[in-house]
Amino acid sequence: MEAGTRIVVHIIAINRSAEVYEHPHEFRPERFLGTRPQTYAWVPFGGGVKRCLGANFSMRELITVLHVLLREGEFTAVDDEPERIVRRSIMLVPRRGTRVRFRPAR
């Protein structure tokens, strides 16, 4: 490998590895309840000295907004079929975006 070669951790490969998660292609958020992920198995903000500076703020904001939305209404999927995943730069994303319907609580 030449000096200056860029090395990137393929986070999607880790997240979809059966060595890390049982049934990795299934949406199972409960897999995180009551346990901590293996070291380096969940790295949404990178790590070490180059870890995202906004990581703590981002997580706090995410928890706050999600709490308010879940308290104030209900989300349901717009489409019955799973969304096709496509590559955008180094990210894998839903092809058309994930579409949900929000119904405010009465």
Image (tube, rainbow, N blue to C red):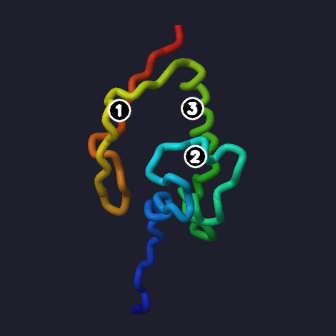
- Pointer 1 local density, CA inside 10 Å: few below 14, some 14–19, many at least 20: few
Which amino acid does the dot numbered 3 rest on? Val
The quadrant where residue 37 appears: bottom right
User: In 3D space, how far apart are the residues under numbered discs 3 and 1 (Cα atoms)?
Assistant: 18 Å
Label 1 sits on a secondary structure element that is loop
Mark nearest the camera among 3 and 1 is 1
Circle 3 residues within 10 Å: few <14, some 14–19, many ≥20 = few
Marks 1 and 2, Cα distance to the nearest angstrom? 22 Å
Residue 22 relative to residue 98: left or right: right
Residue 35, horizontal then vertical, whole percent: 70, 50
| Secondary structure of the residue carrying numbered label 2 | helix
Q: Position of residue 16 (x, y in %)?
A: 46, 58
* Distance of label 2 from label 3 (alpha carbons): 11 Å
Q: Nearer the viewer, residue 7 or 32?
A: 32
Q: Residue at left 50%, top 52%?
A: 23
Do we see residue 48 in this rendering? yes
Q: Position of residue 63 (x, y in %)?
A: 61, 37
Pick the quarter of the image with the N terminus: bottom left
What residue is rendered at 53% in x and 12% in y?
105
Viewer-proximal residue among 16 and 44: 16
Horizontal side of residue 94 vs 29, given as left or right = left
First in sequence: mark 3 or mark 1? 3
Answer left or right for 46 relative to 37: left
Label 1 sits on residue: 99
- Amino acid under label 1? Arg
Q: Which mark is residue 58?
A: 2
Which residue is label 3 attached to?
65
Q: Residues within 10 Å of mark 2 (few under 14, many from 20)?
A: few
Residue at (60% x, 21% y) in the render = 71
Task: Pick whichever of labels 1 and 2 is earlier in the sequence.
Answer: 2
